[in-house]
Amino acid sequence: MCGIAGFLGPPDAPAAAQATLQRMIRTLHHRGPDGYGFHVDGGAGLAHARLAVIDLATGAQPIANERRNVWTVFNGEIFNYRSLRAELQRRGHRFATASDTEVIVHLYEEHGDRFVEHLNGQFAIALWDAERQRLLLARDRCGVRPLYHVRAGGRHWFASEIKALLAVRPELARLDPQGLAQAFTFWGPIEPGSVFAGVECLPPGHLLAIERDGRETLSRYWDWSFPEQGAPQRRWQSVEQAAGELRELLSDAVRLRLQADVPLGAYLSGGLDSSAVVALMREAGAASVRTFSIAFDEAEFDESAHQQAMVRHLGCEHTTLQCTRRAIGEAFPQLIRHVESPVLRTAGVPLMLLAQQVRQAGYTVVLTGEGADEVFGGYDLFKEAKVRRFWARQPDSRFRPLLLGRLYGYLGNSPVRHAALAQSFFGRGMEGLDRPVFAHVPRWTSSRHALRFLAPELRAGIDGWDPLAWYEQRLPPAIARWSPLARDQYVEAKTLLAAYLLPSQGDRPAMAHSIEGRFPFLDHRVVEFANALPAHWKIRGMTEKYLLRKALAGLLPADILARTKQPYRAPDQSSFFVDGEPLDYVADLLSGERIRAAGWFDAPAVGRLFEKCRHGRAIGFADNQAFVGILSTMLIDEFFLRRAAA
């Protein structure tokens, strides 16, 4: 894990070019505290901040091939680098290091732009081909590691985080109202967009080639795909056979992610996914696994009893972070400084605080269960959509919507507890039964509540914008031929996972304290295997992740194996008030004067929401998400816009 930055453009004096690179990379010190590296070649510049994980002695970047005409810096890990290295050596390539980075330049020599197709990893790569005078930017298949780029001042700039771009191009410190509207609807800006005007995020599974003359070619080398409805089932004779293959595949995905020259730990939430990862780590030969988890005072959020059950079952050395509401509220600004985007939930804060504890314990890498719900159909949203489709076929039925009562039992104020509310909330979009976004209409309608608080001129600018239609236009035509569950999974992977979970609860909170997270369930082989499964092997009746549970039989305790999904959550707007009084920075940022000065929101409307939350009268997700979204936007305004203008 590391941070990368650089540029391609008109040549500059080497000393001036390196000074520019230094300004960029110093902003990413948290991503790579173990040293900086630079390469300048005419108008091309590469910079690297290293978090040493593999080949501590000789793995410093940038790294070149034998002829030193291909250079790379990259952020992440290549998990299959040993097999790739062996094959490249058989083809005559000579290696100067034992790092995973070096396989990148040799693969490029062998395969050109298709080198990325051979990588099993989580990565953001910048590669400079000096002979052809071209810069390549590549990002891993699922979007685990971030990579931003922008054209400004006659150059094409790139970096792991936007703050490195702002360090050399302060004029980029402008929010994009469209990106803000996307974040308030889909929980994050939809790639290639960001909330900063002109700054783009390279989409997952894509490669961007930038030629010296400025020509650009963006190509997709991988995407989530599913079989067409009615297509013959591939390769499995029985569910038992598929479960056995899945167990072997998951074991290998975990085994590959145990490669490191530093201590590895694991996050343990107490649910099926993280418990499986820890158990598979033990099975793969890890003599003991150091585990870390979060506990809350409120029963609605706390899973510590299940965490402790797994600790006893596996005999782990375990550390629990007891996270209070006040701690969340006080650390929230730090999270936003790292995330660089509005968020609608506080859930990233405890993960950031946990990463700090992991670092203090002497660990650099953690394995987690992230991605299993998107890959194997674990979220209640997928079951909810199944019920809503059943209901939509008889919309006047009083009994079919009652099946929704089996969902969201972990919520203190679940909408299914009140029949009229459930009919209203889950009945949204029922007329669009065949729309690709059918499953997501209730969630996006709820989160869009935050748009009502935008300043009148911003609301006017997005007046008439239909986010459902806008998003559907971006979907591949083949999605219409997939099963309903496949459509739901694709949209979830491209919105919640890529736009919110991986950046705001994955990469950024961990890297805030120089911790590398590894996600076995997002091994692309696991994703491709799961995508080919019949839908009823993922959700059987109302049992989610059916095949995954069968694959893990005998590995986990029966109560963990049978446990219903409880999504990781944290207290939201209540974290910003103590005995009815707001934290100091909250009172300042949400004051009428400060809201009017920023110009993003309607001050009277924000004032009413503020008082509502202050007195404990916030209603459900809509008010909570609006409050957190407004506060996080004001923090971005404070950190990146006001201070840039000062």
Image (tube, rainbow, N blue to C red):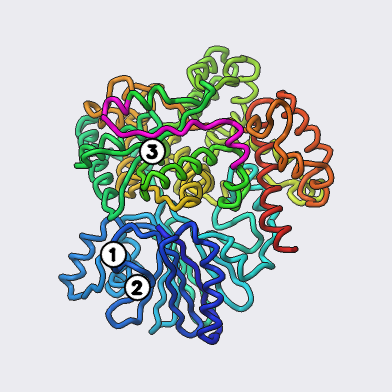
Question: Which residue is labeled 2 in the image?
Answer: 63
Helix, strand or loop under label 1: loop
Q: Are marks 1 and 2 in contact (CB under 8 Å)?
A: yes
Kindly tell me whether residue 613 is visible in this rendering.
yes
Specify few, some or many for label 2: CA neighbours under 10 Å numbering under 14, 14-19, or 20 or more: many
| Residue 220, visible in the rendered structure | no
**Residue occupying the point 21% across, 30% down:** 240
Residue type of the residue flagged with mark 1? Ser
Looking at the rendering, the stretch of residues picked out in magenta corresponds to 310-331
Q: Earlier in the sequence, mark 2 or mark 3?
A: 2
Query: Residue 623: image x %, image y %?
Result: 69, 31
- Whole-percent x, y for residue 299 in the image: 51, 21
The amino acid sitting under disc 2 is Ile
Q: Which residue is label 3 attached to? A: 267
Magenta span contains residue 323: yes
Disc number for residue 299: none
289 on left or right of 632 = left
| Inter-mark Cα distance, 1 to 2 | 10 Å
Q: Name the residue under label 1.
A: 99
* Residue projecting furthest to the top: 399
Q: Where is residue 115 in the image (x, y as percent from the top left)?
A: 32, 66
